[in-house]
Amino acid sequence: MNAYLTDLDHTFLRSDQSVSPFSRETWNRVAPHAALSVATARSYSKAHLFLETLHLEAPMILLDGAMVVHPDKSVIDIKTIGKTVGDELIEAGRIYDGIEPFVIGLKDRDLNEAFRYPTHKTPMQQQVLENYHGDLRLEEHVSMQAMEETLKIVYMAEEHRLRPLTEHLKNIFGDSLEFKLSPEKYTGGYFLTVLHPEGDKAHGMQKVAEYLGRDTADFTVFGDSVNDLGMFELSGTACAVANALDEVKAAADIVLEHTNDEDAVARYLKKAVHVQ
């Protein structure tokens, strides 16, 4: 049985953040014949909204790899940023640029999450929060602080603001944290995600492979952005959707003919697993 691992946003999901009927039907037809799972920046609760109609038995890589969780909510692996380090990072960014991040963390091990956001927001943060209207996880803070179990810290702003901030924070924290700077396609800005150094998708993929008793080289993976590159390096076959970043396409074994809005992943799965 082959194994397939796909990113969600701009890869498996359409740009309106939906699963198309074709992708849903194809996934569920393929599922009995292959190990299928997802690797996403989304949390358990947000990913579940998209996946509740999909047949899924393999562990999911969530929050860019900070958590690996079985669909039944049993935790396989969690990599958190300690509160002390998280607070030091937030303060360093505040002093350097006056910017405040989002902070995503766990309230408890029943996977109840908190999404902390600052009172003083960048335009990109404000735009993103419009999609979270009524979300019970939201917590507003005048001065941001890390949580005891912080899973990731996310800055959103213009590239000219975040690129120097990234280098500044890397100079302070070095390899003790993972920094990923990437374009944010929904807002047109950039985002900087800060994680535990083993909280990325590549480490998450290793945990999924161990759980399934497989080698990572057995996996075909699909992605569009820089946070997928670690999985590309580990996989047997790396597929970039047609709308992927150029650097992701350059790292791929296969650049698919279709975009996320054209069901690129589902089209590949249908041919690879030979379902009718």
Image (cartoon, rainbow, N blue to C red):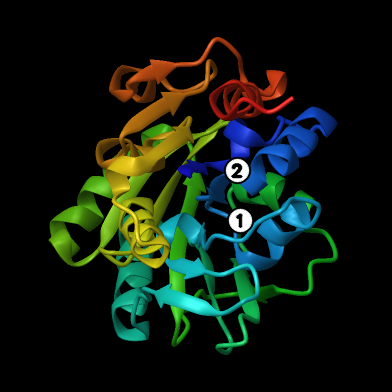
- Looking at the rendered structure, the kind of residue marked 2 is His
**Are the residues flagged by discs 1 and 2 in contact, CB closer than 8 Å?**
no
- Would residue 255 be found to the left or right of residue 8 on screen? left
Residue 135 vs residue 209, the one in the foreground? 209
Q: Quadrant of residue 246?
A: top left
In the image, residue 231 lies at what x, y percent? 34, 43
**Residue 33, numbered label:** 2
Q: Quadrant of the C terminus?
A: top right
Res 125 seen here: yes
Where residue 214 appears, as percent x and y from the top left, is 34, 55
Q: Mark 1 and mark 2: span between their CA atoms?
A: 46 Å
Kindly state the secondary structure of the residue where label 2 is placed.
Answer: helix
Q: Which mark is residue 121?
A: 1
Residue 141 seen in this snapshot: no
Residue 134, relative to residue 216: is it above or below?
A: below
Q: Nearer the viewer, residue 64 or 178?
A: 64
Residue at (59% x, 20% y) in the render: 271
Q: Residue at x 53, y 52 (%)?
A: 41
Q: Residues within 10 Å of mark 1 (few under 14, many from 20)?
A: some
Name the residue nearer the viewer: 227 or 194.
227
Q: Which type of secondary structure does the marked residue at label 1 adopt?
A: loop
From what the image shows, is residue 258 above or below residue 210?
Answer: above
Q: Amino acid at mark 1?
A: Lys
| Residue drawn at x 31%, y 17% as measured from the top left | 250
Q: Position of residue 30 (x, y in %)?
A: 66, 38
* Numbered circle sitting on residue 22: none
**Label 2, residues with CA under 10 Å away: few <14, some 14-19, many ≥20:** some
Mark positioned earlier in the residue sequence (1 or 2): 2
User: Does 272 sit above or below residue 159?
Assistant: above
In the picture, measured across the screen, residue 183 lies left or right of residue 169, that is: right
